[in-house]
Image (cartoon, helix red, strand yellow):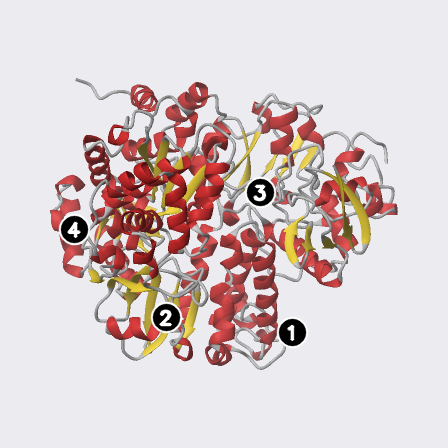
Amino acid sequence: MIGHFTIDGRKIPFREGQTIMDAAMDAGVYIPHLCHNPEFKPHGSCRLCSVKINGRKVAACTAPAVEDSTVENETEELRGDRVTLLQMLFVEGNHVCPGCEKSGACQLQAVAYYCGMLAPELTHFYPLRDVDASHPDVAIDYNRCILCELCVRASRDTDHKNIFAISGRGIKAHLTVNAPSGKLGDTNFDVKDKAAHVCPVGAILPKHEGYNIPIGKRLYDRKPVSVVGDVADHQGEDS
Amino acid sequence: MPDPSVQEVTTELRARWNKDPANLLQVLIELQQTYSYIPEESIELLSSKFKLTRAHIEGVIGFYSFLYTSPRGSYDILISNNIVDQMLGSQDIANLLSEQLGVAIGGTREDGKVSLGYTSCTGMGDQGPAALVNGFTVTQLTRERVAQIVSLIGDQKSVSDWPAEFFSIEDNIQRRDLLLGNEFESGSAISASLSQGPEQILQQLEESGLRGRGGAGFKTAMKWRFCRNAPGNERVVVCNADEGEPGTFKDRVLLQSYISRLIEGMTLCASVIGASQGFIYLRGEYRYLVPQIEAALQEARDENLLGVGILDQPSFNFDIQIHLGAGAYICGEESSLIESLEGKRGIPRIRPPFPVTSGYLGLPTVVNNVETFIAAAMIASNGAEWFKAKGTEESCGTKILSVSGDCARPGIYEYPMGTSIETVLADCGAENVQAVQIAGPAGHLLPAEEFNRSIAYEDMATGGSFMVFGQQRDVMDIVSNFTDFFVHESCGFCTPCRVGSSLLKKRLDKVIVSHATTMDLDTMRKLSALMREDSHCGLGATASNPVTDLMDRFPDVVQKHLRDTSFEPAFDLDAALEEARQVTGRTDPGAHIKGGGV
């Protein structure tokens, strides 16, 4: 069955079972998102893709498309809400863009530029978080983790290794590694794993290639995320 | 005989829980009770036997407040931290215990004997201050009782040998109506269902107007019907007895003194929807009720009202198992509750699908509140008219309230729906009331101008918490306590609730120390609105209510705390320089900042 709904006045087709995000992606309409990756089961945790359907807020990545519904996406109100959500993510962790290897190829940064976030504004948490450099090929910098669980999903559903999990609750929720030591080096994680290439921020970073691509020639340096797409779509590319 | 090894105990517990990974949480809770923590060996063994990663198991342990990976003291004391317990002196009690037992609040004594800390509301607001000692509820903590506890611990008396009156819990029913004031003939609801058939019962429930008593108010008949019509051969009935809303304690009373009606209500539901499996998900704080509930379940089996071939119907088999929670308010949300029943972290599910089509282990599942099941059983027995005769058009029947705080007669009050707050206040002997909190921190804090409002779905919907605050109380303390509660209980899944609840708390603290300006209020409004609209579940959507009620309903209280500049930093700049002044030994005017603004 094919149905239709509108996003910001534009008519979009959808197949039965598709979410608003699925249909929008198929039609080439960009809805800002961080925890969503069409290769994995939708999660709905970052809430950046929240849109208004018939006046009610829903996460586009988990909400089913509804025949004849009216979806608002690029409105000033929703842009403002997204800026606040992004500011929340920036102050929750320790995101120091100028000193981050991922700068320019970071989806959090790119979406923040896209939505027009100029400063974090909210009160910084400055949490004390570790860096795990125990693995020979991949480092984890927990300072930058935004709890999107893409690595959790990729390791579970694609790599079938279940290397990552979430522990803690509330503001203390955090990413964990499946080893008695909690160190990535003590797992069978491999740099070729899917989970090594889905992180939208600089939390899971391949080693030995830092700054191979100079600032200015990185993924989002020339075109916005709405045109370039997700970080995960560009893994292994030179620029 | 030597003590069994950790391996042996873990293996035995796993066997007792049918070697089913869905029972992981129950095995962990029993390990916690046995060892005061979850030993590393148990995690390894459960990981290999259940085929779950250790990170998964650690994630479950890390989610629940009552599970630990390092030992607690032999005496593990957790003081109820609800505002009502605080008003009854819980903080003095905690300080006294800390001083006399030589243990820091939030710590464990060096000899490993005593741990002391706070926990969310334990459901004893009418007989507090209360605490959990090794998981068992101790009420009415007076200074004398503290002295007794200190000496019992000094003598290393096992908690099971402590005086029984420490653990005595009163029902404290102050007003009875339809549910609490009428007799109920055991078996009458199930007989009605068996003789009239499911369709007749559903029609009766529909006519009665019964809606979910947890506060959301979904029509019970509709929920049962959806589940009955969902495809699949097996169905599940779940009773939500995870009464975690601070200030509520009605389920405690219903489970203690009306348990057979609850069992019958669940069995009635099973007969209507065609379920064979049932669960009572009991909040960990009510662990003391487990033996009583087990006994009641056995009694129902003995009377042929539960188990195999109920009331001699060879095809009607239904039984109920108790699952305990472990200190997570979010598990009162029905999809989190189901995740927790399946032994996982209690993260709310994405909906649709709803539990009525895909609930416990993907099976169609009805989740109802304790009071709802009891009402359903009594409606099946007494008829729809009996129920509808009370209440309003949209809110039929009665509502059981848990009244606590500044009043002469705290306790359980059952009222017809539509009863005004004024009436409740007069009946419970509350005078000079400044505010009433309806439906717990997720509900609303109402000033006197709104006491003419009524308890009903169309006005003030509530799960039953009713906390009274006299003129002597500081509204800021109340709001601060509730905001802390949400910081502690947010599951951490979605950004707005996880980060927003802590950010709200930071801003509120700025208001409390009189460093805030109107700009901070604007930020609080922006954060609140985002949490309300963008959160993944109802917890996040209501977690900002205390702060918005403070700003909307108590503007004078906020105004008194505001500075008149447009911006103030979150801290006192001059005070922040104190350390530098001490290090440099400077006291001259140049070492001070006047005004402090930027």
Residue B168's tag is 4
Residue type highlighted by circle 2: Val
User: Which circle marks residue B551 in the picture?
Assistant: none
Q: Earlier in the sequence, mark 4 or mark 2?
A: 4
Tell me: B488 left or right of A93: left
- Tag in front: 2 or 1: 2
CA distance for labels 1 and 4: 57 Å
Residue position marked by numbered label 3 in the rendering:
B352
For marks 2 and 1, the one nearer the N-term is 2
B246 and B155: which one is in front?
B246
Q: Residue at x 29, y 55 (%)?
A: B250
Label 3 SS: loop
**Does label 2 or label 3 sit earlier along the sequence?**
3
Q: Nearer the viewer, mark 3 or mark 1?
A: 3
Give the residue type at disc 1: Val
Q: In this figure, which residue is indicated by the disc labeled 2?
A: B436
Mark 4 or 2: the one toward you: 2
To which chain does the residue with label 3 belong?
B
